[in-house]
Image (cartoon, helix red, strand yellow):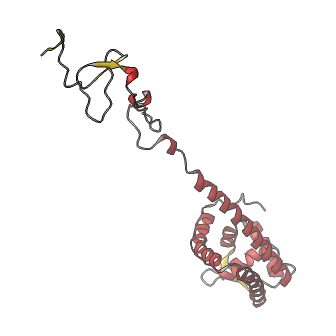
Amino acid sequence: MPVAEEGVLHPAPDENFLPVPGEHPPLTADKHLLPTADGNSVPARDVHLSRTADQDSPPAPDESFLTGPDGRVPRVPVADAGPPRVRDDVLLRAADQLAAVAEILVSVSARTAVAVDGRLSPSLLRALSLVGASPGLSLAALADRARISRSRASRVCDTLESAGLLARVPLAADRRGVGLSLTRHGLSVLGRVRERRDDWIRDALLRMPDADLDGLLSALRSLGPSLADGHQALPGPGRSV
């Protein structure tokens, strides 16, 4: 119903347009006037507005999620969709450090072998160790395990045999087959090489902090089988002589 005031009709205030107590009144169609609780209008400059344009504008979309070609939002944020670079860097550093340690161990093993018998090269020591671990090993099996050609394995065995470290013996199950075994002197030489090498490694481990040593032993329990499986999967060399 219109309201009469001093002979002037004013439209009744829209109750849906009235502000809720405690809130700021919304703007009217006239940007310079604001409605009051009694239905009148006052200049906007007389009313303190606490709202800003940023508060009245809709929130910006979350740019961390982008829709795909099918219009659907992916489950994983775009920023997190990349590869786990941190783990790759850790693996690379671990591989570099492990390779450096392996080179040191190979060098120590070679020096201890030469100290025991000056004729023992790394390839001869490798063959001696393989035959010592598997008495009766065939020449073909030795070549396969050492990753060398059969002709190379034959020459290595010739050298070890001439040094009195290895013997070729006929196989009981196959008179035409020949098995490889270490002589008593060969067993003694291999035992002394391993003893010196183990003493050097033991001294190095004793210089490590206990916490690091415990962690190393735990890692080696998994690393040993993993390296063995990876070694079996590696392709052999081009059977070079």
Residue shown at 47% from the left, 35% from the top: 63
Q: Residue furthest front?
A: 6
Q: Residue 191 sits in which quadrant?
A: bottom right
> Residue 2's x, y, as percent?
14, 14
The answer to which image quadrant residue 194 occupies is bottom right
Q: Nearer the viewer, residue 27 or 179?
A: 27
**Residue 231 spot, x, y in % from top left:** 63, 65
Picture quarter with the N terminus: top left
Query: Where is residue 229 drawn, in percent x and y?
Result: 58, 66
Q: Which residue is drawn at 49% across and 40% down?
A: 78
Locate residue 161 relative to residue 134 in the image: left or right: right
Instruction: Say above or below: 157 vs 7.
Output: below
- Outermost residue toward the top in this view: 7
* Res. 59 image quadrant: top left
* Residue that extends furthest to the left in the rendered view of this protein: 1
Does residue 219 appear left or right of residue 73 in this picture? right
- How many badges with numbers are in the image? 0
Q: Can residue 176 be seen in this view?
A: no
Judge whether 200 appears above or below 122 on screen. below
Residue pictured at 37% horizontal, 34% vertical = 72
Instruction: Work out whether 162 lies above or below 25.
Output: below
- Residue 37 is situated, as x and y percent measured from the top left of the image, at 24, 26
Asked whether 124 or 162 is in front, the reply is: 124
Left-right relation of 95 to 75? right
Quadrant of the image for the C terminus? bottom right
Residue 97 appears in the rendering: yes
